[in-house]
């Protein structure tokens, strides 16, 4: 019997015998009109450490000075909203997990947004109120970008820390959370940096294998953050290498590849790097590679970058095509489900190796 089950039984809660697994997918969201775009940017600047009083003037200057930003917003009228896209993916992931992980059912998947609705805070509050055995927080950004991922996880954890506590005994699992003045208890898990997971590596390799017959080179492209660049660039290079090595196991020819960087839609400063998309394509042409497949390694879903920014950056380079994210990619749905399944099974395996803490007599008095 798991620790959480012992606590629940000891409290004689009357809850369902099995509360199941709740998965909360975290995303910043993406605006759809000028008003919400400027509001989104005002909030985002503070994640970069910019004082709040300076956010609005900077947003105003960026909005009026950037044709690319205004085009991103006008172009989005021709595409699904990010909420629609993510809802379809999340529904597919939930169906896959119900089939792949029956021992963890019921499995319920939700989305929460930092700048849009439903908010991350309201989703976490909802899950705790309804009860769950396991809560998994999943960042939908392929790689850790402090200005994007850290605030999302911070928003989720702020609610968890207010509404729950730990057992407070020596050797107790810090990820076992017990709701204050409530019969609910659950295990907390966090999944981020999904782009480095083996299932996602396999996903990209398979997509390349299906496309490369028409190309003689690959250019992986990602946005370049303002801080922590060294570690980030190293992670991107290692991930690209792993993808190509998996590809080479079954693809009949070696294909040269490069990594290039670009400014995402919400970043007003230059990448401060010579490893730009234009320079990398130029390098490939010097090496007699004439047809390049551009792979947006830092994006799982269609967004401003893949719909507007990247197409504009490669449109003047002949024989270059963007491998754009699909509105609903079943292979990616399956890969996400595999990431979650693997993480759940690894947690169970780790728990079986750790001696159980006797918890019946150590439940905080405030919870009784």
Image: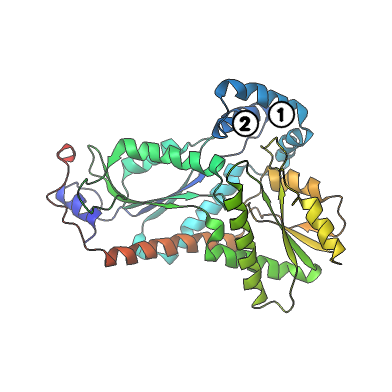
**Camera-side residue of 217 and 308:** 217
Q: Which residue is mark 2?
A: 41
- Element type at mark 2: helix
Q: Is residue 258 visible?
A: yes
Q: Are there few (<14), some (14-19), or many (20+) residues within 10 Å of tag 1?
A: some
Asked if 119 appears above or below 135 in the picture, the reply is above
Residue at 56% across, 62% down = 200
Residue 144 placement, left or right of 306? left
Residue at 58% across, 57% down = 235
What x and y, as percent, mark residue 115?
54, 34
Query: Which colour assignment does the render follow?
Result: rainbow
Quadrant of the image occupied by residue 154: top left
Task: State which quarter of the image contains the C terminus.
Answer: top left
**First reached walking from the N terminus: tag 2 or tag 1:** 2
- Element type at mark 1: helix
Residue at 70% across, 69% down = 210
Q: Which residue is mark 1?
A: 62
């Amino acid at each position: 019997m798991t620790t959480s089950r012992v606590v629940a039984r000891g409290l004689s809660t009357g809850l369902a015998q099995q509360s199941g697994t709740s998965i909360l997918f975290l995303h910043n969201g993406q605006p759809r009109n000028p008003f919400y775009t400027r509001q989104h940017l005002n909030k985002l600047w503070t994640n970069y450490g910019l004082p709040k009083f300076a956010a609005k003037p900077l947003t105003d200057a960026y909005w009026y000075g950037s044709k690319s930003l205004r085009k991103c917003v006008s172009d989005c009228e021709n595409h699904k909203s990010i909420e629609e896209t993510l809802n379809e993916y999340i529904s597919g992931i939930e169906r896959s997990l119900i089939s792949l992980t029956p021992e963890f059912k019921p499995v319920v998947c939700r989305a929460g947004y930092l700048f849009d609705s439903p908010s991350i805070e309201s989703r976490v509050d909802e899950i705790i109120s309804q009860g769950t055995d396991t809560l998994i927080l999943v960042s939908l950004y392929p790689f850790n970008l402090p200005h994007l991922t850290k605030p999302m996880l911070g928003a989720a954890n702020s609610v968890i820390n207010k509404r729950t506590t730990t057992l407070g005994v020596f050797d107790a699992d810090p990820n076992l959370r017990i709701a204050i003045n409530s019969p609910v208890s659950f295990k907390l898990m966090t999944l981020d940096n999904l782009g480095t997971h083996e299932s996602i590596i396999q996903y990209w390799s398979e997509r390349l294998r299906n496309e490369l017959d028409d190309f003689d080179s690959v250019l992986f492209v990602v946005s370049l953050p303002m801080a922590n660049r060294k570690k980030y660039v190293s992670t991107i290079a290692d991930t690209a290498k792993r993808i190509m090595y998996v590809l080479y196991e079954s693809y009949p020819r070696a294909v040269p590849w490069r990594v290039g960087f670009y400014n995402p839609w919400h970043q007003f400063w230059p990448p401060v790097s010579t490893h730009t998309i234009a320079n990398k394509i130029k390098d490939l042409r010097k090496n007699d590679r004439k047809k390049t497949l551009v792979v947006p390694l830092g994006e799982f879903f269609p967004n401003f970058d893949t719909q507007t920014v990247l197409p504009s950056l490669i449109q003047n380079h002949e024989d270059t095509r963007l491998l754009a994210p699909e509105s609903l990619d079943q292979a990616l749905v399956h890969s996400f489900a595999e990431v979650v399944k693997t993480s759940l099974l690894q947690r169970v395996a780790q728990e079986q190796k750790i001696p159980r803490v006797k918890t019946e007599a150590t439940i905080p008095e405030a919870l009784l």
